[in-house]
Amino acid sequence: MKNIAVFASGRGTNFSAIIKAARKGIIKADLSLLVCDNAHAGAIARARRAGIKVALIKKEDLPRKRDFENKIIQHLEENKIDLIVLAGFMRLLSAEFVAKYKNRILNIHPALLPSFKGSQAIKDAFNYGTKVTGVTVHFVDEKTDHGPIILQEAVKIKQGDTLESLEKRIHKVEHRLYPQAIKLFLEGRLKIRGRKVENNLIISK
Ligand code: GAR
């Protein structure tokens, strides 16, 4: 079985969706570790409830990025981590870190990349007035919200939507899409060719 580390900074609802998918056997791997950079993150309580080890690594304690990342690497190596799953981890990883785990880091972003990169994507799309936004799961490369795309799903912005109602629908899609992408990875079904990811599974809604 492969070992997964989930990185999260906030509420951790995607983390919970991943835990559920592992319980159901959709994700066949050990959720070995939560890496968290925020002592107040809801994700920590979710990990404790699920019996998953937590590595709390705070920027305040390790202000130099290199020290911060070396500490993370130490935990990843101790736990023999094969795959890193970013689920609302709000610290950018250095090019060196990404190179070390090349093609073994996944991220979820609440917009249809390459539109609306950054940390406020749902709000940015809503305020821009787009009629369609969505969710992207992608491999992480050295540029922010940029690596090869694994799965995407569109979410329509309806007349009468509020930011909150849109957020709700986006999160619902995230919680379904991320476990599917992780499953594809674990089954060795994702082939990266340049910028493109090919998979041999047709996903039905
Ligand atoms: C998710 O919506 C995720 O897509 C977003 O943070 C949220 C975390 O929610 N990530 C980004 O914006 C990355 N650029 P969660 O803590 O409830 O899973």
Image (spheres, rainbow, N blue to C red):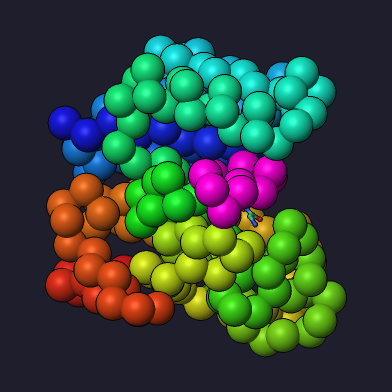
Q: Name the one closer to the observer, 89 or 112.
A: 89
Is 25 positioned to the left or the right of 21 in the image?
Answer: left
The answer to which image quadrant residue 71 occupies is top right
Total numbered labels placed on residues in the image: 0
Is 33 positioned to the left or the right of 56 in the image?
Answer: left
At 65% across and 34% down in the image, what residue appears? 66
Is 50 positioned to the left or the right of 11 in the image?
Answer: left
Q: Is residue 92 a member of the stretch shown in magenta? A: yes
Is 193 positioned to the left or the right of 67 in the image?
Answer: left
At 68% across and 43% down in the image, what residue appears? 91
Q: Is residue 88 a member of the stretch shown in magenta? A: yes
Mark yes or no: residue 141 visible.
Answer: yes
Return the x and y of residue 198 as percentages of the image width and height.
25, 75
- Residue extent of the magenta highlight: 87-97
Return the x and y of residue 174 as percentages of the image width and height.
49, 56
At 45% across and 63% down in the image, what residue appears? 138
